[in-house]
Image: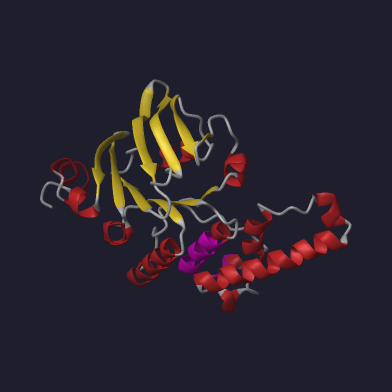
Amino acid sequence: MAEAILRVEGVTKLFGGLAAVKDVSFSVEPGEIKAVIGPNGAGKTTLFDVLTGVQRATSGQVFLKGENVEGKRPDEITALGMVRTFQTVKLFEGMTVLENTMVGCHARSTAAFIRTGLSLPSARREETRILAEATEVLKTVGLETRSGELGTNLPYGQQRTLELGRALASRPGILLLDEPAAGLNPYETGELSQLLVRLREGGLTILVVEHDMGLVMDISDEIVVLDYGEVIAKGSPEQVQNDPRVIEAYLGIEA
């Protein structure tokens, strides 16, 4: 069996003595879509912040491809292959759809700043490669016909798709999606579901925090359920849907 691409071991994050995340452990296998769900305030985004170096864990460890990432900066973790999106869209204003996507490619560019500034041949070759790769990513997410438009001028749903595309452009080993369906209508959510399944079929590993239960149940191989920062259930969508603790904490007693 292949080694887990991401391993979370006993992670706790305290804020002033209050545990936002408490002794959380799980792993994500290569080529898997794993979802983290839970009520508002359950600690999901704090967990993502710890995994990606935005916050430091109070205790516990996070291993990416077997390497302990404790103390590493977000950019260092990105360079190791773990990339995230955020709940709110964070596009670069004044940049086109294509330019926003190229920023993701630059995250792994080998062209040093000085060589790029001097337009040396190696830097020009690198830029040509990045342009081609960004264009291919836009085809993958269905935005190639909007490449010349300002990213911030796109409809909201397409802005979220562009942010996903920019993350994909960095060629992540594992992609962390924080509420990717937030603000999307049912049609856009359906398109997102199909895209994520295609990406998984192409070999991408995905960890997603999401409130849309329809999307979660459609795409997830396994689900981790948090409540008050603690894991209360793990398992397949069917197992989680029928777990009494999940029904009470998240889906509601009447469900």
Residue at the top extreme, as displayed: 17
Q: Is residue 254 visible?
A: yes
Give the percent coordinates (x, y) of residue 194.
38, 69
The spot of residue 101 in percent (x, y) is 62, 63
Total marks shown come to 0
x then y, percent, for residue 201:
41, 64
Judge whether 209 appears above or below 199 on screen: above
Residue at screen point 76% across, 61% down: 126
Q: Is residue 124 above or below residue 67?
A: below
In the picture, measured across the screen, residue 36 lies left or right of residue 171, that is left
- Would you place residue 145 above or below residue 31 in this image? below
User: Is 174 left, or right, of 179 in this rendering?
Assistant: right
Q: Which residue lies most toward the left here?
A: 254
Q: Decide whether residue 38 is among the magenta residues.
A: no
Q: Is residue 96 visible?
A: no
Is residue 162 one of those drawn in magenta?
A: yes
Residue 147 appears in which quarter of the rendering? bottom right
Q: Nearer the viewer, residue 45 or 199?
A: 199
Decide if residue 48 is on the left or right side of residue 212. Answer: right
Is residue 25 shown left or right of residue 165?
left
The residue at 35%/34% (across/down) is 25
Identify the residue at the far bottom of this view. Answer: 145
Task: Farthest residue to the front: give it.
Answer: 1
User: Is residue 119 or residue 185 the one in the foreground?
Assistant: 119
Q: Residue at x 33, y 39 (%)?
A: 41
- Residue 159 horizontal/vertical position (percent): 52, 65
Magenta stretch: dominant SS?
Answer: helix
In the image, the segment drawn in magenta is 152-165
